[in-house]
Image: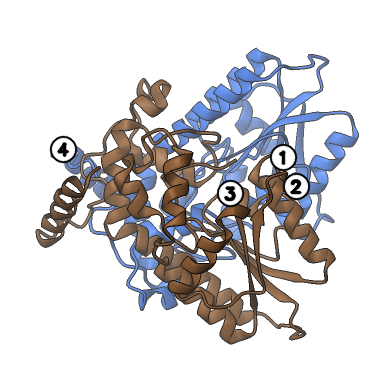
Chain colours: A brown, B blue
């Protein structure tokens, strides 16, 4: 989607909102399409597709179904994505405030980065909203520009945790070569301090689920208590050493195993 | 909701459908209410509430928010509940068909019962759709009537698994005193055979998550391979010995820890 298309898209959303059409994320219940060809015969809507994705029933998927592109666009660019994120952060803050912390500086909260701390939505809007083929070169050049905006609800959680004396550990699938850009981007967007920023070493292959479990295990071996853990992917919050409680942010754009 | 109210409710759904209003599960985006009083100030919709519930972000909750009763009613009695269930079962069957089974009779699939195998919707329609206080006496007498209908998508999965040579284990929080009624109900509804039907003994207190993890561990200790595991509660599919893959059916009516 180019800039003009994006403007038209946002215009359409605005018109819908101004008309009081508040069900903007599923205007036509588009049917599942090319990205899930077998599902088309089931005649299921993108609502069911998103339920399946967000509940970890649909796994290992690649590409938003073409017929759900508009649905995903409305969801991400309309109000619902922000509202769903707000609910998750509300629950996370209520939980964090209920904790009795040890207060020895070893209470940490693990944050994933992409679609958890920083939003790549500007990139995805320009690149098919998850329907296209993943282009590692293009995505890397986007990351190196260090201009991904903060996810505002997550920034609120981050600030609240710091104020409660909980330290933040960023644990990301981004690679070591992206460290400088990631540091720049985080600071520019208001994430000014952290206990650790863990990126994936070039030798650390395998799934994100195993990589992240191993890193969390090392944190615990180093005396940290993972009081909370938040991510947009189930691979951020399943596996081992998941933390005392986990939170799942929405992400209907892509899947990471 | 009495019978008359139910008929009116179904009539309203029918009218909506006949008018081509296909977004019937969230007609007014009702705001969160009494059951989640603190959320009301967030001005969030029942869509976000359901996202939070189905993704295990909202835990330990008791009672559907009063303002989401209509939303939950439309969801459960309209087409979306069935469609979401259909998607889950589609994924489960695709997975089951992909398995290379050992074929020694030790490949099993674990099914929860309530809202996974049998539907208590007739009970909940008469008792506030999850908004009211849980009444153990009333619910027990409903269970003893043995007239809960099969969840049709789950029955399809059950039959497919048997045809593939996978045996079924029912693992339920229902108590031993409900065994006869449960057997009668299962058979009446087409679940004619099973490897085991595990009910909770009166001494087996604690959370469903721990109870079910223990029972699954015993299955594995007895040589069974849990190739799949399906439930409507996260406590059915989290914990230990969860099985090779898990599936989460929708349930916005109640929470079991």
Subunit of label 1: B
Disc number lying in front (1 or 3):
3
Element carrying mark 2:
helix
Residue drawn 11% across the image and 62% down it: A18
Mark sitting earlier along the chain (2/1): 1
Density class for disc 2 (Cα within 10 Å; few <14, some 14-19, many ≥20) is many
**Do the CB atoms of the residues marked 2 and 1 lie less than 8 Å apart?**
yes
Compared with B14, B30 (above or below) is: below
Q: CA distance from mark 4 to mark 2?
A: 43 Å
Q: Which residue is mark 4?
A: B20
Of the pair B126 and B163, the residue shown nearer to us: B163
Q: Which residue is mark 3?
A: A234
**Do the CB atoms of the residues marked 1 and 3 lie less than 8 Å apart?**
no
Disc number lying in front (2 or 1):
2
Where's residue A131, x and y in %? Answer: 36, 36
Element carrying mark 4:
loop
Q: Which residue is mark 1?
A: B171
Q: Which residue is mark 2?
A: B212
Q: Are marks 3 and 4 on the same chain?
A: no
Residue B158, quarter of the rendered image: top right
**Do the CB atoms of the residues marked 4 and 2 lie less than 8 Å apart?**
no
Of the pair B74 and B218, the residue shown nearer to us: B218
**Do the CB atoms of the residues marked 3 and 2 lie less than 8 Å apart?**
no
Q: Is residue A173 left or right of residue B28?
A: right
Residue drawn 36% across the image and 68% down it: B32
């Amino acid at each position: 989607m180019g800039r003009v298309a994006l403007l038209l898209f946002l215009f359409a959303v605005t018109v819908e909102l101004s008309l009081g059409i508040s069900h903007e994320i599923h205007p036509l219940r588009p049917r599942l399409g090319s990205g899930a060809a077998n599902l088309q015969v089931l005649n299921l809507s993108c609502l069911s597709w998103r339920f399946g994705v967000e509940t970890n029933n649909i796994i290992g998927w690649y590409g938003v179904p073409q017929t759900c592109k508009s649905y995903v666009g409305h969801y991400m660019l309309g109000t619902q994505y922000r509202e769903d994120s707000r609910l998750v952060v509300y629950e996370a803050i209520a939980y964090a405030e209920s904790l009795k912390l040890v207060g020895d500086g070893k209470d940490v909260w693990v944050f994933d980065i992409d679609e958890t701390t920083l939003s790549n939505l500007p990139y995805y809007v320009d690149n098919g909203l998850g329907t296209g083929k993943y282009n590692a070169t293009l995505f890397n050049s986007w990351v190196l520009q260090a201009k991904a905006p903060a996810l505002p609800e997550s920034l609120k959680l981050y600030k609240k945790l710091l104020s409660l004396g909980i330290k933040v550990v960023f644990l990301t699938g981004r690679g070591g070569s992206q460290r400088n850009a990631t540091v720049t981007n985080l600071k520019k967007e208001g994430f000014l301090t952290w206990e650790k920023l863990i990126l994936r070493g070039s030798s650390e292959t395998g799934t994100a689920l195993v990589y992240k479990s191993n890193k969390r295990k090392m944190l615990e071996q180093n005396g940290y208590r993972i009081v909370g853990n938040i991510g947009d992917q189930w691979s951020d919050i399943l596996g081992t050493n998941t933390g005392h409680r986990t939170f799942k942010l929405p992400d209907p754009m892509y899947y990471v195993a």
